Image (spheres, rainbow, N blue to C red):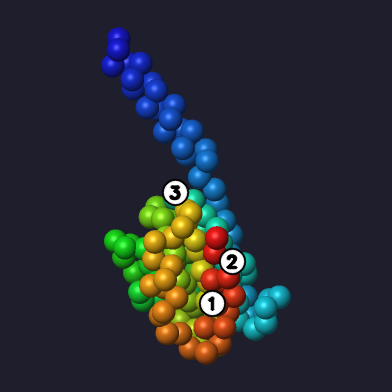
Amino acid sequence: MKRKICLAMMLAFGMAGAAFAAEHEVKMLNKGAAGAMVFEPSFVRAEPGDVIHFLPTDKSHDVQSIDAMLPEGVAPFKGEINKPYDLVVTAPGIYGIKCSPHFSMGMVALIQVGDAPANLEAAKVVKLPKKAQQRMNADFDQVK
Ligand SMILES: [Cu+2]
């Protein structure tokens, strides 16, 4: 009897957890509010377990993690060109994202998962192409 109650409680908590997982949409655009070749929004504040949907609204874009801009233990990832990409963020921290064809044109995004990201300072010292650095710095300013 006791075990059954325990299992029911675990299920209830598990379902509550799933209900709190949020979904975020990021469009990949040739032109957005910040100029040409952008992720919009380029900064997303998420919680562990959330899903980030990257949508190929315009053509010729992809989604890739930026080297050394991932939480410890998170493997680099890479979507396909012109395909939607779902990123499930389980580990807290900073996730640096680029579109590989337009990285030098500044097509980058930043995902913050949880509070006080442990890898923020490490991510900030990663060298990016000039335009990408400008936009990434604006994204870093939104990290709280
Ligand atoms: Cu692109």
Q: Which one is in front, 116 or 21?
A: 116
Q: Amino acid at mark 2?
A: Gln
Which residue bears the numbered disc 1?
136
Q: Amino acid at mark 3?
A: Gly
Cβ of mark 3 under 8 A from ligand 1: no
Left or right, 54 with respect to 58, comes to: left
Q: Amino acid at mark 1?
A: Met
Q: Position of residue 81 (x, y in %)?
A: 47, 75
* Residue placed furthest toward the right: 33
Which residue bears the numbered disc 3?
49
- Asked whether the beta carbons under mark 3 and mark 1 sit within 8 Å of each other, the answer is no
Mark nearer the N terminus (3 vs 2): 3
Looking at the image, residue 80 lies above or below residue 92:
below
Left or right, 76 with respect to 60, comes to: left
- Classify the position of the C terminus by image quarter: bottom right
Assess disc 1: are there few (<14), some (14-19) or many (≥20) residues with their C-alpha within 10 Å of its C-alpha: many
Question: Quick check: can you spot residue 17?
Answer: yes
Element class at badge 3: loop
Element class at badge 2: loop
Q: Residue at x 57, y 83 (%)?
A: 134
Q: Residue at x 30, y 12 (%)?
A: 2
Question: Quick check: can you spot residue 27?
Answer: no
Which residue bears the numbered disc 2?
142
Q: Position of residue 111 (x, y in %)?
A: 50, 64
